Amino acid sequence: MEKTALEDFTRADWDLLGAQRKRYYADEQANQVLRMLAASEHDTTFGYQVNNYRHSLQSATMALRDGLDEEDVVVALLHDIGFIVCPQRHGEFAAALLGAYVGERNEWMLRRHAIFQDVHAPHHPDADQHARERWRGHPHFEWAATFVARYDQATVDPAYECAPLEHFEPMVKRLFARQPRPMPLPD
């Protein structure tokens, strides 16, 4: 496009951009997400024995070894992708990133997983051991509790043998190649 302001674009311009955007996203969205995670490979940590990159690989490797489906494995890989750049809302960050490509169960869990983690940190001064109880009875409560117990709070072991990021790349690419579902804006 040679135009320099959106208000100057014609309907034909928008139609062309729309067609190009679909192909571009199909090729590039997964690549950029993978680069974002890969960029954290050598990051420091503020006290955990593993950095967020290793935590992500450990989570995904455990999910894979437990026989979870491909969507759940990718969710495990990327559930904390916003942990450093968006620490107060990292679950919502992951839900916004993945929500259109995953089922409601995973989108719901991603949005709330940090709160579900509080039950596993009984000595944390800010953890509310009962915060997750407001959702007890919700159809996705047990999945969120299971995911956090198995693939989040227990995945900071420096001795755990993880699959490399390259092992998960085809899975991430297949997930982002899905037709995205509509995501309504929150109120």
Image (tube, rainbow, N blue to C red):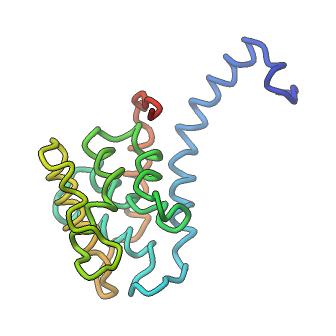
In-front residue for pair 76/177? 76
Q: Is residue 134 above or below residue 131?
A: above
User: In the image, is 8 to the left or to the right of 40?
Assistant: right
Where residue 60 sits, quadrant-wise, is: bottom left
Q: Is residue 125 above or below residue 91?
A: below
Horizontally, residue 140 falls left or right of residue 70, namely left
- Tell me where residue 16 sits by quadrant: top right
Whole-percent x and y of residue 8?
Answer: 84, 19
Image quadrant where one finds the C terminus: top left
Image label count? 0
Q: Nearer the viewer, residue 89 or 53?
A: 89
Q: Residue at x 18, y 59 (%)?
A: 145
User: Measured from the top left, where is residue 161 in percent x and y?
Assistant: 30, 80
Task: Name the residue located 57 percent from the left edge and 68 percent from the top edge.
Answer: 39
Q: Is residue 144 left or right of residue 107?
A: left
Horizontal side of 112 relative to 130 (left or right) equals: right
Pick the front one: 90 or 167: 90
Compared to 115, does 161 lie above or below? below
Q: Quadrant of the N terminus?
A: top right
Q: Position of residue 19 (x, y in %)?
A: 62, 23
Q: Residue 135's spot in the image, x, y percent? A: 20, 48
Q: Between 135 and 12, which is closer to the camera in this rendering?
A: 135
Task: Give the residue drawn at x 44%, y 38%.
Answer: 177
In this view, the residue farthest toward the top is 11
Splitting the image into 4 quarters, where does residue 119 fall? bottom left
Q: Residue at x 33, y 79 (%)?
A: 125
